[in-house]
């Protein structure tokens, strides 16, 4: 992953991220990039599994796709912020218009990163969100 200009951090973990992405390759790719950058990442292939994990332990950031089986990312984000009002939310999606729709009940403070994106942009945005 370092060949993609992702800065490798020391062993000190930068934050706990809950990643929900139904595309297997994308989930592995994102998870590996974030781990290489120094984040502690728990990855799930659907919103319901991610939500169940969130009920068991706290995370600093929910990084979720929007269109997923069992529970979509918007519902996952809504429930996540009910459980933990301090959790930060970022949508990674090819459907930014859905995330921006004011009628979708998505957390208003959620950030959106539209696919496709560069991994370094994702890592930089995650670092920025977690330092705010």
Image: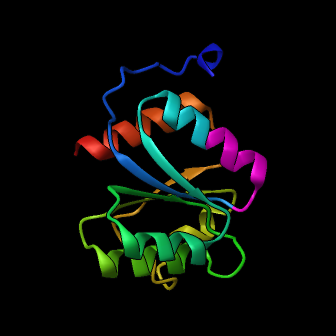
Front in this rendered view, residue 45 or 108? 45
Q: Whole-percent x and y of residue 78?
A: 42, 79
Toward which corner of the image does residue 49 lie, by quadrant?
bottom right
Q: Whole-percent x and y of residue 87?
A: 31, 63
Q: Whole-percent x and y of residue 124?
A: 43, 32
Left/right placement of residue 82 relative to residue 103 reads: left
The residue depicted at 49 percent of the width and 75 percent of the height is 51
The residue depicted at 47 percent of the width and 19 percent of the height is 7
Q: Whole-percent x and y of residue 77?
A: 45, 73
The residue depicted at 40 percent of the width and 63 percent of the height is 110
Please tell me whether residue 83 is drawn above or below residue 132 in the rendered image: below
Left/right placement of residue 28 relative to residue 126 reads: right
What is the magenta segment's predominant secondary structure? helix
Residue 101 at least partly seen: no
The residue depicted at 32 percent of the width and 36 percent of the height is 14
Please tell me whether residue 35 is drawn above or below residue 90 in the rendered image: above
Toward which corner of the image does residue 65 lie, by quadrant?
bottom right
Left/right placement of residue 15 relative to residue 23 reads: left
Q: What is the span of residues highlighted in magenta in the rendered image?
A: 22-30
Please tell me whether residue 55 is drawn above or below residue 94 in the rendered image: below
* Quadrant of the frame with the N terminus: top right
Please tell me whether residue 65 is drawn above or below residue 127 in the rendered image: below
């Amino acid at each position: 992953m370092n060949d993609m200009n992702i800065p490798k951090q020391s062993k000190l973990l930068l934050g706990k991220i809950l990643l929900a992405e139904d595309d297997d390759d994308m989930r592995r790719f994102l998870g590996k990039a974030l781990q290489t950058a120094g984040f502690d990442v728990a990855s799930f292939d659907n919103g319901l599994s991610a939500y169940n994990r969130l009920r068991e332990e706290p995370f600093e950031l929910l990084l979720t796709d929007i269109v997923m089986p069992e529970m979509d990312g918007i519902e996952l984000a809504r429930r996540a912020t009910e459980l933990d009002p301090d959790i930060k939310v970022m949508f990674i999606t090819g459907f930014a218009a859905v995330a921006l729709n004011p009628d979708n009940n998505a957390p208003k403070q959620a950030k959106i990163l539209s696919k496709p994106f560069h991994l370094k942009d994702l890592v930089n945005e995650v670092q920025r969100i977690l330092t705010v």
